[in-house]
């Protein structure tokens, strides 16, 4: 893989119809903070398709999937917990 293609997923998040994300959103330690940031971004962004909830969840899932095995168990658990927090933030929690 060449240097130009190493970061294609970063290019997608910066130049596609992806959300305009706050800096370092995926490096935060608090799942609720990650969810709140994604929610703010989804509600403010003009670069999205679908509902704000769909856009925020899609971006989080995209990040988790692209990081793959490079995520530690702790980081993956934090990001997976952020999915639950995102559902709560949008009133879509399931019991």
Image (tube, rainbow, N blue to C red):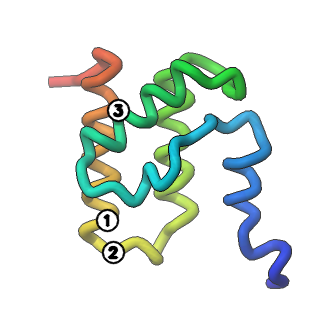
Looking at the image, do the residues carrying marks 2 and 1 touch, with CB atoms under 8 Å apart?
yes
| Quarter placement of the N terminus | bottom right
Dot label at residue 32: none
Q: Secondary structure at mark 3?
A: helix
Where residue 47 sits: x, y (%)? 71, 28
Which mark is first along the chain, 1 or 3?
A: 3
Residue 17 vs residue 89: left or right?
A: right
Q: CA distance from mark 3 to mark 1?
A: 17 Å
The residue under label 2 is 72
Q: Quadrant of residue 73?
A: bottom left
Give the camera-side residue of 2 and 34: 34
Where residue 57 sits: x, y (%)? 47, 35
Which mark is first along the chain, 3 or 2?
A: 3
Residue 82 vs residue 20: left or right?
A: left
Q: Quadrant of residue 93?
A: top left
The residue under label 3 is 36
Judge depth for marks 2 and 3 and give the one in front: 3
Q: Quadrant of residue 17?
A: top right
Q: Residue at x 84, y 83 (%)?
A: 2
The correct choice, above or below, for 35 with respect to 65 in the image is: above
Give the camera-side residue of 12 and 95: 12
Q: Residue at x 45, y 75 (%)?
A: 69
The residue under label 1 is 75
Q: CA distance from mark 2 to mark 3?
A: 22 Å
């Amino acid at each position: 893989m060449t240097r130009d293609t190493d970061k294609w997923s970063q290019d997608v998040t910066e130049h596609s119809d992806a959300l305009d994300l706050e800096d370092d959103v995926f490096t935060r330690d608090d799942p609720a903070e990650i969810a709140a940031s994604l929610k703010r971004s989804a509600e403010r962004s003009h670069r999205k398709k679908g509902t704000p909830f769909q856009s925020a969840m899609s971006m989080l899932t995209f990040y988790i999937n692209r990081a793959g095995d490079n995520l530690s168990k702790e980081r993956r658990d934090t990001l997976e917990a952020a999915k639950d927090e995102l559902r709560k933030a949008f009133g879509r929690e399931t019991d």
